[in-house]
Amino acid sequence: MIPFHDENPTKNFPLLTILLIGGNILVFFWEFSYPGQTASLFLNYGLVPYELMQSPIQTYPNVFSAMFLHAGFLHLGGNMLYLWIFGNNIEDVLGKVRFIMFYLVCGVIAAMCHVYMDSGSRVPMVGASGAISGILGAYMVLFPKARVKTLVFLGILVTIIRIPAAILLLLWLGLQIFSSIASGNVGGGVAWMAHIGGFVAGMILILPFKASLQSPQREGF
């Protein structure tokens, strides 16, 4: 399943969401101009759990720089797609300043969850997935009944269905939990616990803002 649009209009122009997407894309293309191999780039600017545990003050800036690095077009494209679909509504609720703070805090918590579960890893963690997972968690709390248009592949057939956000995002969360268990929390460089931690952080941190929604949900299940 590939979601591509939510039926949940916003009141304000999603400037910060667009800037985050643009920033991630610019950094991705900057990666191609980095002198040396991509591996050295990720070691220098990605988050290496072992190094963070050994030198937290020196390494902590990498918690933030890692959020803007991506390992390939699919990695970048998937993250930016989810940020575009779900980020604009969270920005609408929080406003510009609180939205960027929320995004970064969720990213930090997600990274710390990964470090806690795999503190001896020397593999760099990169990507915006943890921060975006926080956006997904917030969206599920605020807009569980919003319909999301999703591509579904049935063999050679492709169809579009409208899925309530709660179902889609719970399926996504379930996949992260299953993958984490199946891989022993370390799955081929995929930081599953960062996804889970970010999602849970987003669900919790958005609760104080839930009452600020002035309009009721538009559709039921």
Image (spheres, rainbow, N blue to C red):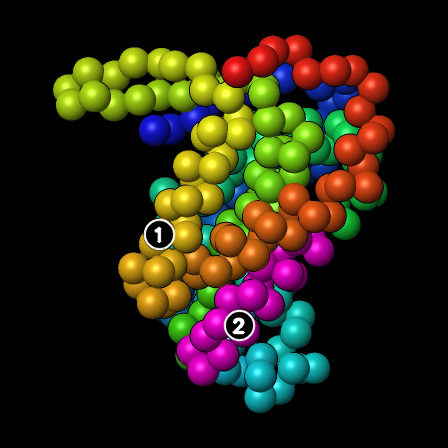
Judged left or right of residue 177, residue 18 is right
In the foreground, 143 or 48: 143
Under tag 2, what secondary structure? helix
**Residue 115: assigned label:** 2
Badge 2, how many Cα within 10 Å: few under 14, some, many 20+? many
Q: Taking the image as drawn, is residue 124 in sight?
A: yes
Expressed as whole percent of the image width and height from the top left, the position of residue 88 reads 66, 29
Q: Tell me the residue at 53%/29% (across/down).
A: 166
Q: Tell me the residue at 81%/41% (across/down).
A: 208
Distance Cα–Cα, label 1 vs label 2: 19 Å
* Main SS class of the magenta portion in the image: helix
Q: Residue furthest front?
A: 221
Judged left or right of residue 74, residue 45 is right
User: Can you say whether 219 is above or below 178 in the image?
Assistant: above
**Residue 178: assigned label:** 1
User: Can you say whether 211 is above or below 79 in the image?
Assistant: above
Expressed as whole percent of the image width and height from the top left, the position of residue 42 reads 46, 67
Question: Upstream in the sequence, badge 1 or badge 2?
Answer: 2
Magenta stretch bounds: 103-121
Q: Taking the image as drawn, is residue 44 in sight?
A: no
Rendering quarter of residue 99 = top right
Q: Amino acid at mark 2?
A: Val
Is residue 106 within the magenta segment? yes
Of the 4 image quadrants, the one containing the N terminus is top left
Expressed as whole percent of the image width and height from the top left, the position of residue 141 reads 65, 35
Expressed as whole percent of the image width and height from the top left, the position of residue 112 reads 59, 68
Under tag 1, what secondary structure? helix
Badge 1, how many Cα within 10 Å: few under 14, some, many 20+? some
